[in-house]
Image (cartoon, rainbow, N blue to C red):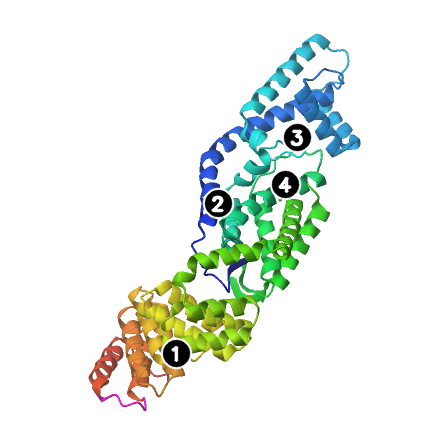
Amino acid sequence: MLIPLRHENMRGRRWPYITFVLIGLNIVVFLLTHGPIQQQLPQRARTRLQLLSFSAVHPDLQLSPDAGSFVQGVKKSVGSQQWDQFAEKQKAALHTTGDDEDTAALQTQMDALCSAFETEQKGDILDNYAFVPAKPRLLSYITANFLHGGWLHLIFNMWFLWLAGFILEDNWGRLIYPIFYLVAGAAALQFYGWCAPGSYMPLIGASGAVAALMGAFLVRFPKMKIEMAFFALFFRYRFHAPAYYLLPLWLAMEFFYGSVMGVSSTVAHWAHVGGFLFGMAAAYGLKRSGLEQKASEAIESKIAWSAAPEMVRAGEALEKSSYDEAAMILTNYLKQKPTATDALEMLQQVQWRRSDMPAYLDATAQLLQLHLKAQDSEAAWRDYEAYCHAGGDQLPAPAWLDLARMLEGQQNFDRAASEYVRLAEAHPTEKQSILALIAAGRLYLKKLNNPEEALRCYEKANASPVSHLDWQPNIESGLRDAKAAAPVVSPKA
């Protein structure tokens, strides 16, 4: 399984209220409708199967307009050959040829089935609010985008909505963005309807609108790096790749699955394709029309009073892909305000796009230290993971020690001990290496029940070239306790 985790620019200029509202609406609608839909599905399936079976066995009976449209639509979608095979199977199951039966009694049964079908249609959520290509309702072009079939369906759609949506909202504003989202969802549904014009299969989910956001993301931020995670059984792997590589590959896969499986799949691949293409076209149109620029300028005018001029100029340079200029502005600004987290985050992004990995690692390490001072453990750990994934193995000793202590404070003793050891190995001549080895020995001895490893840590601390007179009593005490706790190994004969 391949899942996007985050992208380079996870901070916007303003709170993404519209994205929050869209996600909230989807969750609320799901909570209100999922239970009733699950209750309606079994009876819905039975009634439709009975109607189709009875119509196949007795094709001369009269059907109500709605029931007749349904039966003819299904018959057309499966083809006459498959329909005839279905009819023969139903006759065999009922042990009848369909002839020499009481026509009036049969028509009464058919009328009852038609009545049940129409009654269920009136109260059925899927019939009224899902998108049904064979009989699309105007309202369903909106409501279908807020219905979901299960928790995983909802969670994945909302995660993709968050990743692609909030950054587009930040650039398009709170008027263009929701209009785009709703129109894109309708366009994706219509594209699917063109691919399956006679289908009575209800289509639900926000994936068409989300696919449009992904298409717009590709046009708007083609070079932005996306962090991906690959999961396969017990194997996990993370990597970064630009949007111009990942998103076209996803589109190609959707096109392939749509071509091979058609509309028989439980996943609406053609809605994804249609939404993605619409999103690309709409984003390009917004950019060329100047509406995007006007919206961005309006946002800047509202927030400029609180933003430093250097940050505004650096943001404009980044927007124009003038990375060297942006880096110079931010570097000079950080000399005056070394604790400006927002400037460091932007500089980190700039250095990544410049492919200047030493500068990227330096900015990430500084950012980690600021997050540690602010006691933002989640952000600090995220910085550390980004540092390691970029090839960093020489995190400054003070920051590394604070990070390991943070892990210990969270009672993540195993990881804390390993980070203490890594610190000592990476910085053997720094005083923090002694503190790290003592802390690791204590954890291995007191928390992890591993006196052998504790003994090794204390021995390394005792042999360290770094002056450790102040900590010698701690080291000697740790050596005694570790030796006393370590199992005695008998010499071999």
Which secondary structure type mostly characterizes the magenta part of the structure? loop
- Image point (58%, 62%), residue name: 221
Could you tell me which secondary element the residue under label 3 belongs to? loop
The first of marks 2 and 1 along the sequence is 2
Where is 87 relative to 420, above or below? above
The first of marks 4 and 2 along the sequence is 2
Q: Are marks 2 and 3 in contact (CB under 8 Å)?
A: no
- Residue 335 - label: 1
Circle 4: residue type? Leu
Residue nearest the viewer, comparing 355 with 343: 343
Residue 108: image location, x then y, percent: 66, 11
The CA span between labels 2 and 3 is 26 Å
Left or right of 134, for residue 442: left
Highlighted range, magenta: 464-469
- Residue 135 - label: 3
Q: Does the image show residue 167?
A: no
* The stretch drawn in magenta includes residue 465: yes
Q: Crowdedness of circle 4 by 10 Å Cα count: few (<14), some, many (20+)?
A: many
Q: Are marks 4 and 2 in contact (CB under 8 Å)?
A: no
Q: Where does label 2 land, which residue?
A: 22
